[in-house]
Amino acid sequence: MAIDKMMLDSLTSGYKFYIDDLKNRNITGEYYDTVEALYNRILELGDECSDMNQMYAKMQNENIMVKLSDAYTKALTEEGTKKYGSSGNVYDDNYLMKNNVEALRNSIKAMRDSFDDVMKKASPSEKMRLMVDNNPETLIKSVEEMIALSEQPGMTYANFLRLQIEQGLDTVMQGVTTRSVLEKILYSHKALMSPDYDVRMWEEKVQEYEKAASRNRFNVVDLHEWALISDRIELKYIPERTRRTRIFDLFMNILGKIDEWCIAYCSYTPYEIFPWSGMPLPDALRSLKRIQKTAPGLVKELEKMLQHYFGLRFIDIVDNPDFRHHVLTNFVDESQELIEFLLMEVYPQCKPFCDLPSEIIHKREQMHRGKREGNPGRNEPYRRMKRYYNEVYGEGYMEQYMKEQNMSKMDSVDTDSQAAPWNYDAFLQNVKK
Amino acid sequence: MADQRLEEYRKYYDARTERYANNPLRRHSYEAEKRLRDLFYQYDTLEEIRDHFGTLNIDCAFAAWRDQYEMESQYYESVEQPVRKKGADDILAQLPNHTDVTDMGAVITDISNRNNVEIYSDCYSGEALINAWEQLDSITAFTNAEVPDEYKSYMLERAEEIRQHIRENVQDIEKTMGEWIAGWRMKPETTLQNRHRRQLPYSDADVEQHLEQFKAITNR
C-alpha cells in the first residue's frame, strides 16, 4: 500500500524548499544538481515505500537528509564567495551591519508569514491556542529591539555585537527555554492538579533554572547545559513515579475486579450495563456467570502480587496517596458510598468458590436504582480543565474546542448521580472502624 | 595607540570570552575565545589582526562543539546511558579529523541520526519487558487462579491469548526496526541494564523471573 499522499506531501514539501530557494537565488552548478538529484530520490522513495517508517529508514540509510542539507549549504556558500570573496577578505563594518540587520528584518517577515500560514489553516479554537502558544510577536519584539539597537545614533558594528551579548539578545533566536515557560508548565500542573511528584519535579526545574542563570555573567542559561540539567531532574523522579503508578494500578485493577464480580450478580446488568447490554442475552448471562466464578480467584492472585512486590494488602488502598489524589481530584468514577460498600461488604465475600450473598446483591441493586453508584463530582476534572484553558487561551476557548470535537454535551451535562459528594476524612473513618 | 574601532572590537571579543568565564563546561570555548581576543590585544591595527586571524574563528566553532559533546558524554556516563554517550563520543572522535565547519556540521547530523537509530533499538529491546510486565502478571493470574474445574480451560485460553499478543507485539516491533537495521532482533535482556532496570520497581529475582518468562514466550 502506498504512503498517504497528504503525509508524503508534508514530508517532501520541506525538502522542496531547498530546490525552490536555490532557484529563486538563480544558483546553479554542481551543488544545485546534487540537491535536485537527492530531491528526486526522495520522490522515488515516496513511490517505492509502503509507509512513513520505511520511507524515513531508507532516507536515513542512504543518508539523504545530511547530503541534501550539505549540498544546499555548499551551494549557498559558493555563491556567497563568488559575490563577496571569502569571509576573511570582508572587513567592512557597514556591509556586515547592513547584512546582519537585513537578516533580522527577513527573520521577522519569515516568522509572521509562517504564523499567518498556520493561522489560515487553523480552526477557531486552534487560533486561540496558537495566539498564546505560538504567537511570534514576543520573539519579534526582541528582534526589533536588536534592530533598534543597530539604529541608535553612532552605533558601530562592534558595539552592536557586544551589546547583543550583554543584553542576552543574541540567544533570543536560539529559542532558549526561559524561566517563564517553565513557570507556565508548573502552573498548569498545579491548576490541573497533577500528581504531587510532577508538581515537585517542575518546581525543582524552576529552581535549578534560576541557579543555572545565576552562574552566568549575563544571566543566560546555556541551551545544551539546560537540556542535561532538565534530563537529570526527570530521571530522578522515575523510580518514585513508576513505583507509585504500579501500586496504584494494581489497587485499581483489584478494585475493578471486585466491582465487576459484584455487578455480575445484579439483575439489571445484562440489560443496562455495557458490554453485556450489547450482547445477545444468552451470551451476556454466560459471560456474567463466568465472572461470578472466576473473579475471586483472580482477585486473590492480584492480592498476592501486591503483597509480594510491595508488601501491601488490598485494604491499604485507603492510605495510598495516589488513591487519595484520585478521589480528591474527582477522577474517581465511583461514589464514596459505592467504594465503602465494595471495601467493607463485597470484598470480604470475594473468595474463590464463594458466591455473593443475596442481601449484598440486593443492596447493590438498590444503590443502582437510587442512582448512587457514580461520583457526583465526576465532572469536576472537566470544569477544572475548562477554567484553566479558558484562563490561558481566552474565555470561550474550551467551549469552542469541545464544539469542534463534537463533545459539546460535556459542557452542559452533569452526572446524574444522587450519591452524597465524597468526604475523604469521613471515608477514612468509616472504612477503618 | 589603538584606534576607537579596534577598542570597540576588543570590548566585543572581551564580552564573547566573558560569556564562558568560570564555566568548566565551556572551558574549550573560553580558551578558543580567549585566543581570539588575545589576538586583538596583540596588534594595534585591524589589518595586522586580519593577517594573523588564521583559523581562530573556526576554532571557536569547533571548541563549542567539543564543549557540548564532552558535556553530553560526561553527563550520559554519570547517568549510565552508554548508547546516548556513544553518539557524543563518536562526534568527539571525528572533531580532530575535520577543519571545515560545514563539513563537520554534516558529520554531526549524520552521527546524530545514526545514534538515534541505536537509541530506538536500545529502547525497543530494553522496554519490551517493562511494557509487558502487567501482561505477564495477567498470565500468571489466569494460570494460577483458583476457579471451578469447568472454568479452568477458559482461564488457560485467556492466558494463551495474552501470550499471543506479546508475540505479535514483538513481531511488529521487529518489523518496524527491521526497516532501519536489516535483520534486527529484539534483545529482551537489555532490560537488565540500569538505564531500563530503574523503571521496574521490583526485586532482581522478580525481574529475572519475568525476563525468563518473556523470553520463553517470544523465543528471543
Image (cartoon, coloured by chain):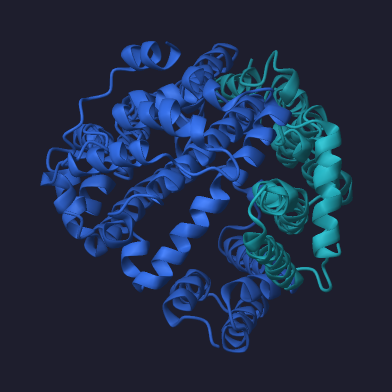
Picture layout, residue B45 above or below residue A261 = above
Is residue A93 at least partly visible in the picture? no
The residue shown at (63%, 23%) is A312
Residue B114: horizontal and vertical position, in percent?
A: 76, 59
Residue A129 percent location from the top left of the image = 26, 46
Where residue A134 appears, x then y in whole percent? 33, 45
Q: Residue at x 57, y 38 (%)?
A: A351
Residue B182, quarter of the rendered image:
bottom right
Q: Nearer the viewer, residue B64 or A295?
A: A295
Q: Is residue A255 left or right of residue A396?
A: right
Q: Residue at x 55, y 24 (%)?
A: A221
Hey, which quadrant is residue A385 in on the image? top left
Which chain appears cyan? Answer: B
Q: Quadrant of the N terminus of chain B?
A: top right
Q: Nearer the viewer, residue B173 or A243?
A: A243
Colour chain A is painted in: blue
